[in-house]
Amino acid sequence: MTESARKRLDELKGLIDNANYRYHVLDEPEVPDAVFDGWMRELLEIEAAHPGWVTADSPSRRVGATASGAFEPVAHAMPMLSLGNAFSDEEVRDFVLRIEDELGVRAPDFSVEPKIDGLAISLRYERGVLVSGATRGDGETGENVTENLRTIASVPLRLRGLDAAVLEVRGEVFMPRQGFEQFNRAALEAGQKPLANPRNGAAGSLRQLDPAVTARRPLAFFAYGVGVVEGWTLPAKHSQTMAQLRELGFKVSPEVAMASGTEGLLAYFARIGALRDGLDYDIDGVVYKLDDYAQQKAMGFVSRAPRWALAHKFPAEEQLTTVEAIDVQVGRTGALTPVARLAPVQVAGVTVTNATLHNAEQIARLDVRIGDTVVVRRAGDVIPEVVRVLPDRRPMQSNGSPLHEPYRFPDVCPVCGSATQAVQRVVRQTKAGVELGEGAAIICTGGLFCSAQRKQALIHFASRKAMDIEGLGEQLIDDLVELGFVTSLSDLYRLSLDDLLEMRRRADERDGTVPETVKQGKVATRWAENLLASIAASRSTRLERLLFALGIRDVGESTAKLLAKYFGSLDRLMQADADTLQGIPDIGPVVAANITGFFAESHNRDVIAGLRGAGVEWPESEPQRAEDGPLAGQTFVLTGALQAFTRDEAAARLESLGAKVASSVSKKTSVVVAGEAAGSKLEKAKQLGVAVWDETALQQLFDEHGAGGG
Ligand code: IVH
């Protein structure tokens, strides 16, 4: 019945794709592995019978030629046990007391180890050669993943200097964090789905049907014990076995140590907890193992867990909860951060009610909506974040569509109502241009007008390199703003002695403090007089200081100087369009857009008018035109390593001659100066037919124009 076989094939593709998605992407496997393997086997059988039906998107295309479609079951000769868990110091104390009582010893020695968050594996060596490797499975029976394990560099294929009849080595396969991040970066660049987390990455990688795929995954193995041993005598202590395993060629976590008694165990737990974020592998707790095998034997087992070992777990870092609302907070720098308000949930030991959603892109990527069930994560000291949404638990209407629409990021600031704007995050500004961070930030363009940004704006405005108002520190600014004495920058210049004294009185009243002077029936006025004097002194300033003081995004001291020099007057700068601004060396599209955006906002123009009205003044000068230099109108791009000068020096000399120095090559580029090991920019210049000079030609140019002195 080809017809039904064809239908079944399509059905299997759907089932397998869905299961793969849930396992690899959502990290929420829904069907048991055996069912999945059965589907895969069935699909391969149908395709084998009908080779013409194999399509490019078939899940079988992930499978190598030798793939079986399933892993055989392996019965463990010695069961792989689980560990009893402890979540509190109390439980650890009880564990130690039980051992002390039963064995009649005091503060016994333990091997203390990180509990690696990967996949338990048993490796079987016969006559020193790896013959099979299996997952833990249910502890009695695991899956044979030998071929995949062979691809892991830290799994020895042969023991170093031991040919015992049988040695089973047990340990954990994991994906180091660095490898995980690297793998995900590459996957994202290639437009492929990233791995959900390192543990899932390790599990998924070992389960690949094609060992060639596993081989490309960054996996590692840490040994933590032995199973069946024949033809070799184990040392008397676990710690000695670990040392032996190292000599046989296994990696053992460098954090494995010794400790005695409850205090020793708890100290180790605290030490590893503090180290946790800095490790290159995920751990979910520590494991305490009685070191002496004779003592282990005496303690024995209950059900499937040893009574001589204990897993002391860190509190879970991920939990499920629901989203009650999505709010947007405005930071002191104007960045809008979306925040999920959550039904309270305990995560990693604290109650979490809010979690950051980072930015608009993240919200869109997660598609978080009100009412959604989400995974929240709080790792270390990091602020809680929403990791993912469980789409199957989304509240629905009776007509089958979601109850809530996708979230829309507000296009006005929730605090002041000014327009919001997407800006590239500038990480660093260099001679070669600006370096941009990942993703756009949404900011409030209200700037000085926005109360969320007001304090920050005032602190910056008064700072030494800006308007340099001595004595106007953070505490005073807090009080001035909070008690309503200052709402805009120009209000500073309207403060009277009475205002300041009244403000201080109210601040003292609010804080319940009674200053010494008041007790003495006097009023301290000196500080206020001094402050008024320095505010007054700041009225006469320079354009570059004022420009810096305005706090325009990405306009630091040096850009402010540059703008002051090129425009000479504030009005000319305010009228400049983005193209004119980009004509200035070092000003790229992002900074140009920030400047024009700032002056386009009427609130900001009001602030400037207010300052002028309050008597703030600065000398203006003629604009310095780039057209004045001998290289006016020419654009140079420097690439590769120069010998006689650094690129910065060469750029400065070119600019002093009126040229513009740009960081990328375009049709508008006049000359590309290519030094040693020039790369893509040189290629581009050749493609576009732009003139290419070597360093000698540049030197000649400088000699001709007498700009050799730098
Ligand atoms: S010893 C009889 N040591 O934890 C002792 N297990 O619940 C058996 N694990 O699935 C395990 N790091 O994969 C031991 N240093 C360590 C471990 C460790 C991680 C995992 C192991 C097992 C689970 C036990």
Image (spheres, rainbow, N blue to C red):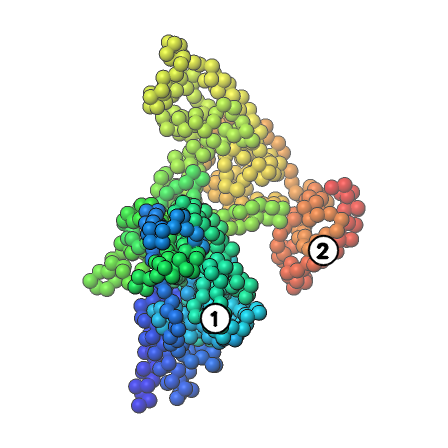
When the figure is inspected, residue 599 is found, relative to residue 666, above or below; the finding is above
**Which one is in front, 555 or 156?**
156
- The x and y percentages for residue 527 are 47, 17
Q: Ligand 1, what quadrant?
A: bottom left
When the figure is inspected, residue 65 is found, relative to residue 596, above or below; the finding is below
Q: Which residue is mark 1?
A: 167
Point 28% across, 53% down: residue: 322
Point 41% across, 51% down: residue: 108
Classify residue 445 as left or right of residue 372. Answer: right
**Which one is in front, 363 or 550?**
363
Crowdedness near tag 1: few (<14), some (14–19) or many (≥20) residues, C-alpha within 10 Å: many
Rendering quarter of residue 397: bottom left
Crowdedness near tag 2: few (<14), some (14–19) or many (≥20) residues, C-alpha within 10 Å: some
**Which one is in front, 354 or 145?**
145
Q: Which residue is mark 2?
A: 675
**The residue positioned farthest toward the bottom in the image shown:** 1
When the figure is inspected, residue 212 is found, relative to residue 437, above or below; the finding is below
- The x and y percentages for residue 304 are 32, 64
Point 62% across, 57% down: residue: 666
Point 43% across, 13% down: residue: 524
Secondary element type, mark 1: strand
- Separation of marks 2 and 1 at Cα, in angstroms: 60 Å
- The x and y percentages for residue 363 are 37, 54
Secondary element type, mark 2: loop
Total marks in image: 2
| Quarter of the picture holding the C terminus | top right
Q: Is residue 316 visible?
A: no
